[in-house]
Amino acid sequence: AQSVTQLDSHVSVSEGTPVLLRCNYSSSYSPSLFWYVQHPNKGLQLLLKYTSAATLVKGINGFEAEFKKSETSFHLTKPSAHMSDAAEYFCVVTLYSGNTPLVFGKGTRLSVIA
Amino acid sequence: DTGVSQNPRHKITKRGQNVTFRCDPISEHNRLYWYRQTLGQGPEFLTYFQNEAQLEKSRLLSDRFSAERPKGSFSTLEIQRTEQGDSAMYLCASSYTGDGGEKLFFGSGTQLSVL
């Protein structure tokens, strides 16, 4: 079965420093992978997606993620954290090849300290 | 309407009662999904529709749960004989297969509390 493991339940960074949120996936085929963000009292929002094109994927708000098949990883990064980045981040894989539904990781809560 | 709308936002009910939630997707989206999210966990897939057809149901969806999308537009999720373990945030999402169908737009959810 397809699954994702988010290696940190909570990450805390200072404003202006880099962000790294780690995700490993397990899939029996070439997966589609996503990162979603959930701000308090707001709906989940797609940050970026990987669908077997370029391995380095750029998303919204300065985030990007790199697909590494050899490491089965899809880590999310941002060069400089902003206070507004504080939220819950979910790494996501498709349940079926090339199709939804989506399987979510347990999430990583990002805190940004002023 | 530029987003997925869910009603009600909050529902408090007593154990054993029936509850129904409604989801209005983005108008041109033909796929509609239901997910459930509990505290500290990621959303878990429950079921999804393409137009009015229910294409997949998770084993999480017990016999007490039923979802419909009668005209391929809005959807309802009903829980019969609620249990305390049903307390969760119920999320609805929609997507359009014409652009690949993989970009899901989520509503803000219905928070269910079963007392």
Image (cartoon, coloured by chain):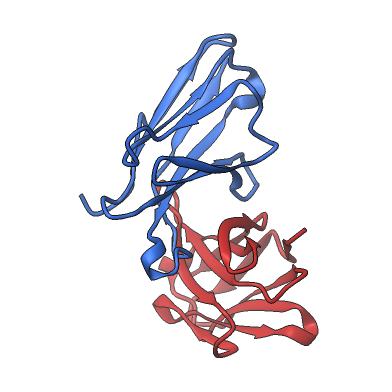
Chain colours: A red, B blue
Q: Is residue B74 left or right of residue A91?
A: left
Dividing the picture into quadrants, the one containing residue A51 is: bottom right
Q: Is residue B4 above or below residue A114?
A: above
Q: Is residue B58 above or below residue A102?
A: above
- Residue A22: x %, y % from top left: 69, 73
- Residue A27: x %, y % from top left: 75, 68
Q: Is residue A26 above or below residue B113?
A: below
State which quarter of the image contains the N terminus of chain A.
bottom right
Rendered residue at 58%/42% (across/down): B37
- Residue A15: x %, y % from top left: 49, 76
Point out the residue furthest to the left here: B1
Q: Is residue A88 above or below residue B80?
A: below
Dividing the picture into quadrants, the one containing residue B69 is: top left
Rendered residue at 62%/50% (across/down): B42
- Residue B9: x %, y % from top left: 37, 32
* Number of residue marks: 0
Rendered residue at 56%/63% (across/down): A99
Dividing the picture into quadrants, the one containing residue A105 is: bottom right
